[in-house]
Each structure stands twice: as structure tokens, then as C-alpha cells.
Image (tube, helix red, strand yellow):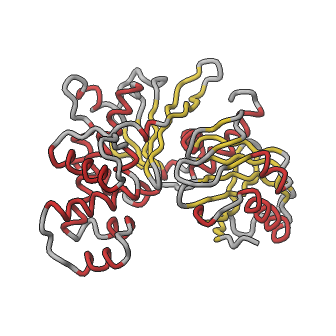
Amino acid sequence: MTQFREVIYQKDFQVSRHGVLAGDIGGTNSNFGIFEMEGTKPVLLFSLHAKSQTVHDYGALVADLVRYCKEKYGIILEQACFGAAGIIMNDHSLVKPTNLTVAIDAKAIMKASGLKSLTLINDFIAVGLGIDYIAPQDIVAIHTQKLSDQRHAQKACLGAGTGMGKAALVWNKHFKRFLPVASEGGHADCAAQTPLELNLLASIQTELAQPGCPISWEDVLSGEGIKRIYKFLGTQKKYPETESSKEIATHGFQPDLISAYALKDERCRATFDMYTMLYARCAKNFVLDMLALNGVYIAGGIAAKNIELFKQKSFYEEFIRCNKHGDILKQVPIFVIADYNVSLYGAVAYIQLREQGIV
């Protein structure tokens, strides 16, 4: 049986015979939440976690998970929805995640696990739907000035982790709610503006052995992107060797370590200065692309762990830097989502909306 890491959210919860299974499958982690419904409100009881790169068969993985929940808690899982980083095909039943080698086939998983229903959705569709279900304190306001007449204007949702995801939230006047629209904008070309940034992209092209191939936002703003910026800056300037830099090199330039030392190590700080600038530009471009005057929501593991970076003056200054629409951008609210489980809540919300015929 698969070894899951388990996190309990509701201590001493009363076991309900039936639960709802939500999943968030990314390039690094496969996270699953077991929910109980209190009326229309999803309550996260506990979550189970596996490393995605170790999973060779999601049917077997989910079968183990379903068995574990039944044997340990007496919970029967029949309904499920998984968000995955990739393009969803075959009427929400198949996805080949962008940063994994294994496909996720809903029909095969249902056959292996005994689930009666399983819907696959894009991971940022799940994030967009989950915003309304997480605690208000987990939506951290970075900038709150707002255009007074834009309550039904679009919202933008984006975030970096192993990859870079985006979704638009569009008001549906028939159902009187915001509904997400999928995007693969994380794979759009990164917009370099300075010689240093252009040199960074050239170095990534060399690293990827793809000379002349456009470098995407994901190539720069993901966890791998942090590593690439750090290593690139080391070729541009002689930084003093420190205990931090030794540790980072010893551990293979792990992004979490570079992040941990961002406030006290010069090279780490320069890495995140550049990273923050590019992240702000990516967010600005997405807001302008879809005229998201109702706000931009920044999600993903990197943002949740580094909220202070988005509060820096440099992030906001780059976000509003625009030749003709800077005054409009100044009035777009900016939020960082601190609850990493937002996509699990969104997956449960999708099940509810599908039952209602809304999606």
C-alpha cells in the first residue's frame, strides 16, 4: 500500500459513512483532501500526500487511498474531483500533466478504485473556485484600492509552483456568480525588458538546449526558475561565498533554501528581487490581457511561503508600470492566497456546480 503523509484538520471528527474526495495533482506533489459536507459547506477532515514523481499508476494510488480511508476511518469514498496541471481532454476524463510523464485517466482510476464518479479539471479552475471557500484571513490583501463600479468585472488568478498556472474568473449573470475559464498562459513567452533579463533568457535557452526557442513564464517563475535565476546571477557578478551559499550549493540549489535566505544573503536577495519583478510583470500582463479590474489573486506554493516578497515596493511598482494604463492598474486589488488547500476546496465546489448544471 502507498505510504501517504497525513495531515488532520478536524480533530475528533465524527465519522460520516460517505465522504467526498478532492485531489490536486502537480509536478511535485499529489495532494488529496477528504471532505464532509455540512449542507453545502465542504469541511476538510484530513489530507493525504504523495510525491508525484514516485507515482507510476494513479489508479493504484487512488485505490490505496480509498482503501485506507475505509479501513482506518470507516469512510466510503464514491465521488471525486481532481485538479491537475495540464489541458483536460475527453469530457473531463483524461489529462497528461505538463510536468509528469504519467497520464491521469479518470475511467481507469474509477475501475481500479471503485469510485462511482471522478471528474478531472485544470488545477487553476480549482483554485479559482476555491477562493470563495477558504477562510478570509487566508486571502492576504497586498493592495486594496478598487474601482467602485467594477464588482462584476473579471478577476485574474495565477500562481507558480512546479509550473505556472493561470485562470480567468468571469461573472455569469444567469447564475449570478463568478465562473473560472481555463488558461495555459503560464506557457506564454516571458516578457524580458532589460539586457540582464534578456541574458537570463539566453542562459535558460542554453540550459534547455533549445537555442532560439521562446522562454515561457513557467521557465522563469517556477521553482526551477528560482534555481535558474540564482545560478545565472552567479555568472554575472562575483558574490561573496557565505555559509548560506555553501549550503545551497551542497543541496543542489533547492528553491526552498534560496527562498529561506532571501532576506539575509546578497545573492539570494538579488535572485528574489529579479523573480519578484518578473512575477509582477506576469501578473500585470494577465490583468491587461483579460481586463481583470476586479482583482488579481496570486496562488501557488511559492507565493504562500513568501508573502512578504509580494509586499515589497518593487512588486507594486512593476505591477503598475504601464505607459497608458498605469492609473487603471493602481486601482486593481492584489491578493495572495495563503491557504495551500484552496484547490482542494475548489475541486469539491466543482462537484457541486456540476450537479447543479452550472459547469
Q: In which quarter of the image is residue 189?
A: top left
Q: In this view, does 170 lie to the left or right of 90?
A: left
Q: Quadrant of residue 62?
A: bottom right
Question: Which residue is painted at 15% across and 45% down in the image?
Answer: 195
Question: Which residue is painted at 37% across and 59% down in the image?
Answer: 306
Where is residue 255 drawn, in percent x and y? Answer: 37, 65
Q: Residue furthest top?
A: 174
Where is residue 51 drawn, in percent x and y? Answer: 59, 65
Instruction: Please identify the quadrant where the C terminus is shown.
Output: top right
Where is residue 289 drawn, in percent x and y? Answer: 38, 27
Q: In this view, does 164 lie to the left or right of 87?
A: left
Question: Which residue is painted at 46% across and 31% down in the image?
Answer: 155
Number of numbered discs visible in the structure rendering = 0
Question: Which residue is painted at 65% across and 50% down in the image?
Answer: 103
Residue toward you, 294 or 265 = 265
Q: Is residue 311 visible?
A: no
Residue toward you, 111 or 125 = 111
